Image (tube, helix red, strand yellow):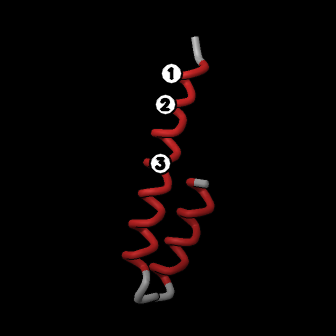
Amino acid sequence: MGFVGGIQCASKFFSNDPDFKKSVINWGAAIVFAGVVGLVLTSAFGK
């Protein structure tokens, strides 16, 4: 998820896409969400 999102953001940056900032914000939020879900699952089902 992080690698694919990073590539998409980089391609928008180099093509001067006006939605670049929106894409970066969405990508960052997705990474934070994945981290939170991982922590919750680890605390619920982990050691």
Q: Are marks 3 and 2 in contact (CB under 8 Å)?
A: no
Is 3 positioned to the left or the right of 10 in the image? right
Q: In this view, does 35 lie above or below 13?
A: above
* Cα–Cα gap, marks 1 and 3: 15 Å
Q: Which residue is drawn at 48% across and 62% down?
A: 27
* Cα–Cα gap, marks 2 and 1: 6 Å
Find disc 1 in the rendering and name its residue. 43
Foreground of the two, 8 or 40: 40
Q: Do the residues labelled 2 and 1 touch (CB within 8 Å)?
A: yes
Find disc 2 in the rendering and name its residue. 39
Q: What residue type is labelled 3?
A: Phe
Residue 12: give x, y in percent of width and height: 50, 80
How many other residues sit within 10 Å of disc 1, few (<14), some (14-19) or many (≥20)?
Answer: few
In primary-sequence order, the first of circles 1 and 3 is: 3
Q: Which amino acid does label 1 sit on?
A: Ser
Residue furthest to the top in view is 47
Residue 11: give x, y in percent of width and height: 55, 77
* Cα–Cα gap, marks 3 and 2: 10 Å
Q: Residue at x 43, y 48 (%)?
A: 32
Foreground of the two, 7 or 36: 36
Find residue 33 and name its label.
3
Q: Residue at x 49, y 56 (%)?
A: 30
Total marks shown come to 3
How many other residues sit within 10 Å of disc 3, few (<14), some (14-19) or many (≥20)?
Answer: few
Residue 46: give x, y in percent of width and height: 59, 17
Quarter of the image for residue 4 reads: bottom right
In primary-sequence order, the first of circles 3 and 2 is: 3
Q: Is mark 3 on a helix, strand or loop?
A: helix
